[in-house]
Amino acid sequence: MKYAQLEIFTTVELAWMRDPTRRRNYSAATEEFRREHKVRRAFGKALGHTTRLRRDSPEARTPDGKLMWIEAARALFREANSHRAQVVADHERDRRRATGDLFDWGRFTHRWLAKYAASY
């Protein structure tokens, strides 16, 4: 179907009129991925938008007007970088060195699970 004046149609109408199977690089798997990705992307964008609205709402502020999530992040950062945390980390490193266990299996297995376990 050919139309001489395509500008009289909306983008949605033009997309409906186009036949994707006539494209040179058409792939059914690619089209299925595009449809699924469009839904997931819309969901992710909506989720991010509501997260930002919730984060920036007046209820998300401390009584002195500071954002709670920023204060929580600062507290976690202070805790992770405190002298006590460094002493514990140094002690653990020295203990592992003394036992000959230089490879961090906990970190490795966590990374492996995060990367590959979701695909099972």
Image: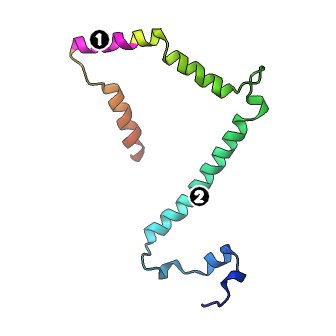
Question: Magenta segment range?
Answer: 89-99
Circle 2 — which element?
helix
The residue tagged with tag 1: helix, strand or loop?
helix
Q: Amino acid at mark 2?
A: Val
**Residue under circle 2?**
39
Q: Is residue 2 above or below residue 48?
A: below
Left or right, 8 with respect to 34, comes to: right
User: Residue 68's x, y, as percent?
Assistant: 68, 25
Q: Is residue 70 above or below residue 92?
A: below
The crowd level at tag 1 (other Cα within 10 Å; few <14, some 14-19, many 20+) is: some
Check disc 1 and give the amino acid type. Answer: Asp
Q: Nearer the viewer, residue 10 or 19?
A: 10
Magenta stretch encompasses residue 92: yes
Q: Is residue 101 left or right of residue 62?
A: left
Locate the N terminus by quadrant: bottom right
Kindly identify the residue that appears in the image at 53 percent across and 60 percent down: 36
Q: Which is the main secondary structure of the residues drawn in magenta?
A: helix
Residue depicted at 49% across the width and 69% down the height: 31
Pick whichever, 37 or 3, lies toward us.
3
**Disc 2 or disc 1, which is closer to the eye?**
1
Cβ atoms under marks 2 and 1 closer than 8 Å: no
Q: Is residue 86 above or below residue 32?
A: above
Residue 22: where, in percent of width, then height?
A: 48, 82
- Residue 112, by quadrant, is top left
Residue highlighted by disc 1: 94
Q: Residue at x 54, y 21 (%)?
A: 77
Question: Could you classify mark 2 by the number of other residues whose Cα lies within 10 Å: few (under 14), some (14-19), or many (20 or more)?
Answer: few
- Residue at coordinates 77% horizontally, 29% vertically from top-left? 59
**Residue 93 lies in the magenta-colored region:** yes
Between the residue at mark 2 and the residue at mark 1, the CA separation in whole angstroms equals 50 Å
